[in-house]
Amino acid sequence: MLKGQVAIVTGASRGIGKEIAAKLAELGMKLAIVGSSADIHETAKELKKSGFEDVLAIQADVSSEGQVQSMIEKTLQQYKQVDLLVNNAGLGLFKSIEDTTFDDWKRLFEVNVQGVFLGVKSVLPHMKERKSGTIITISSDVARYTIPNGSAYTATKYAVQGFIGSIAQEVREYGIKVGTINPGMVDTYIAGSQQGLEEKKDWLQVEDVANAVVYMASAPKHMLIDEIILHPFVQNYPIA
């Protein structure tokens, strides 16, 4: 179903985004992978070495309106269409409110919220014109409940959930599907952590989130999956 379609994946240099890109490539999608550092070009090389030729690497800061618009333009120049946007780029910060600086707060909102807003706003004119497309945002389970020492991060995820819910209603008349994937604890690099640590062996793996993206993106035309929440079995998930 996804073969031959075009996907943009942000935050794809490593971790969840890199795995999402690999899964979509395996299904025959053409990719524009986006990262804030030059590492994104190494990820593209790795994918191409694995036999996936249709991979365009774009270095861009998702909090910059000009760079996000350029990201969409470059993808359209290369592939002529965008079928799927995966807003995966994000920052994690877990501090008490006293230790959270104003710069911390601003940067979290710039990447986690503003980045999603800009990605959606920039791709929608193209998707509306084609009357098709899917937008998936990787958020967090804390979009549904709160945690201590994570007020700024949690606030960004509540903001994203509200934004995406509104956009989903706004664009459905154009045949565009919009949803969120809200994972719990994932063995990845969030908040400066390392992937593959022994204490995270029972957490969700990056492929679990990537599989959820594939499931949501592959839904038949008549079905909309608004949200997927997933957790490792070991996580004590508070029901909101």
Image: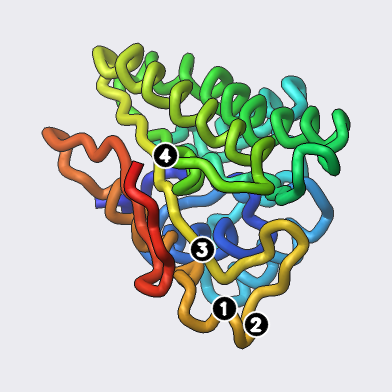
**x and y, in percent, of residue 58 in the image:** 71, 45
The amino acid marked with disc number 2 is Leu
The reply to whether dot 4 and dot 2 touch (C-beta < 8 Å) is no
For the question of whether residue 69 can be seen, the reply is: yes
Taking the image as shown, residue 88 lies to the left or right of residue 168, namely right
Disc 4 target residue:
144
The amino acid marked with disc number 4 is Arg
For the question of whether residue 86 can be seen, the reply is: no
The amino acid marked with disc number 3 is Met
Label total for image: 4
Label 3 vs 1, first from the N-terminus: 3
* Crowd around label 4: few <14 · some 14–19 · many ≥20 (10 Å): some
Task: Identify the residue at image location x=63%, y=45%.
Answer: 89
The amino acid marked with disc number 1 is Lys
The reply to whether dot 3 and dot 2 touch (C-beta < 8 Å) is no
**x and y, in percent, of residue 98 in the image:** 83, 38
Disc 2 target residue:
197
Taking the image as shown, residue 67 lies to the left or right of residue 127, namely right
Give whichever of 137, 204 is nearer the camera: 204
Q: Is residue 238 above or below residue 227?
A: below
Q: Quadrant of residue 55?
A: bottom right
Q: Secondary structure at mark 3?
A: loop
Disc 3 target residue:
185
Which mark is in front, 4 or 2? Answer: 4
**x and y, in percent, of residue 124 in the image:** 47, 19
Disc 1 target residue:
200
Label 1 vs 4, first from the N-terminus: 4
Q: CA distance from mark 4 to mark 2?
A: 27 Å
Q: Secondary structure at mark 1?
A: helix
